[in-house]
Amino acid sequence: MLKVENLKTYFHTREGAIKAVDGLSFNLKQGQTLGIVGESGSGKSVAVNSLLGLIPTPPGRIEAGTAMYRGEDLLQMNERKLREVRGKKIAMIFQDPMSSLNPYLRISRQLTEILVTRGEATEAQALERAIECMGYVGIPNPKERIRCYPHQFSGGMRQRVMIAMSLICEPDILIADEPTTALDVTIQAQILDLLVSLQKKLNMSVILITHDFGVIARMSDRVLVMYAGKKLEEGTVDDIFYRPRHPYTQGLLKSLPRIDDDYHDLPYIEGVPPDLARLGKGCVFAPRCEHRMTICTTDAKIPLRGKKGHQASCHWQG
């Protein structure tokens, strides 16, 4: 469905080139969920925004790479062609539904706009489709609620509206950028269950961006671990949770609280993420790695190692 190779997105500033995404590659099959996990600032959101041409230019610029979708390179498409892909073929759920929804417009206007402007439906037909989508995502009394403004919905309901908006054109690929951020645990579970059921119903492929390993375990088929703009490890959910190979992945998993362990101090990864404008030679995680060797700080090229389907970019394979 989607094949991304050697994606590089840099932001050019007075401080130098910020290598937000530096050589990222991954594949996405039809009906599959790919989870992308990592600390804040690891490049997760920048990577998917690059695919849809949503990087502010300047200062951002895609320096290299390809993103093949149905035989066409998304990174080489002009704005007109990308507008045909966004929403209809590849849709996105953004992090904060309140900032993504226009507070001055009714929900009806925001849901129907994409269908009307594309000429795919009349206003009456688009409204009927919007009400149907609101019902899909579990919003009660959709015929009445569709006339409301965003502030009249709770956080969970606004997120459901965003999901309805992304699904109204029945896209091939859904990008969910931390769809449960700032929601309480009960609402998070409802939103995740909703995404799973809609994915099966529409046979969509999903790219799920999060820093929550619980969400990854529940939703994903494959997992990609990012750090400082690079892919450090990729594998199945079982590979990542039960057989992690990269020290960074191992550190993330150790830092998760467990109800079956009797300890007082939660383990954590020492140090801070690097300055992306001043990356040194070698592995980007080397300054924080407890297993680093001399080669880790001098060898700029670290190949992906491991069996097919589960690989890590690391000289030390734990």
Image: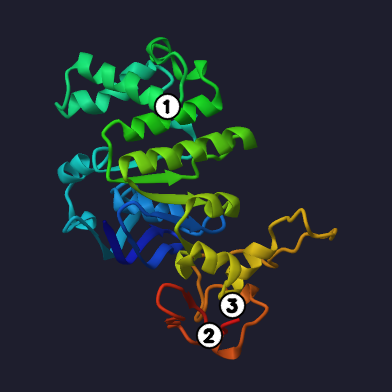
The image shows residue 44 at horizontal and vertical percentages of 45, 55
The image shows residue 204 at horizontal and vertical percentages of 32, 46
Residue drawn at x 43%, y 83% is 301
| 97 or 300, nearer to the observer | 97
Q: Which mark is residue 161?
A: 1
Foreground mark, 3 or 1? 1
Classify 209 as above or below 316. above
- Are dots 3 and 1 in contact, CB under 8 Å? no
Q: CA distance from mark 3 to mark 1?
A: 42 Å
Q: Decide which of tag 3 and tag 2 comes sooner along the chain.
A: 3
Classify 204 as above or below 140. below
Q: Decide which of tag 3 and tag 1 comes sooner along the chain.
A: 1
Instruction: Read off the residue under disc 3.
Output: 286
Q: Decide which of tag 2 and tag 1 comes sooner along the chain.
A: 1
Instruction: Read off the residue under disc 2.
Output: 315
Describe the element under mark 3 as helix, strand or loop.
helix
Q: CA distance from mark 3 to mark 2?
A: 10 Å
Quarter holding the C terminus is: bottom right
Q: CA distance from mark 2 to mark 1?
A: 46 Å
Graded by Cα atoms within 10 Å as few (under 14), some (14 to 19) or many (20 or more), the crowding at tag 1 reads many
In the image, taking residue 100 as reference, residue 278 lies left or right, namely right
Camera sees residue 92:
no
Residue type, numbered disc 1: Val
Classify 254 as above or below 154. below
Classify 120 as above or below 222. above
Residue drawn at x 22%, y 13% is 124
Describe the element under mark 1 as helix, strand or loop.
helix
Residue type, numbered disc 3: Ala
The image shows residue 29 at horizontal and vertical percentages of 31, 58
| 65 or 55, nearer to the observer | 65
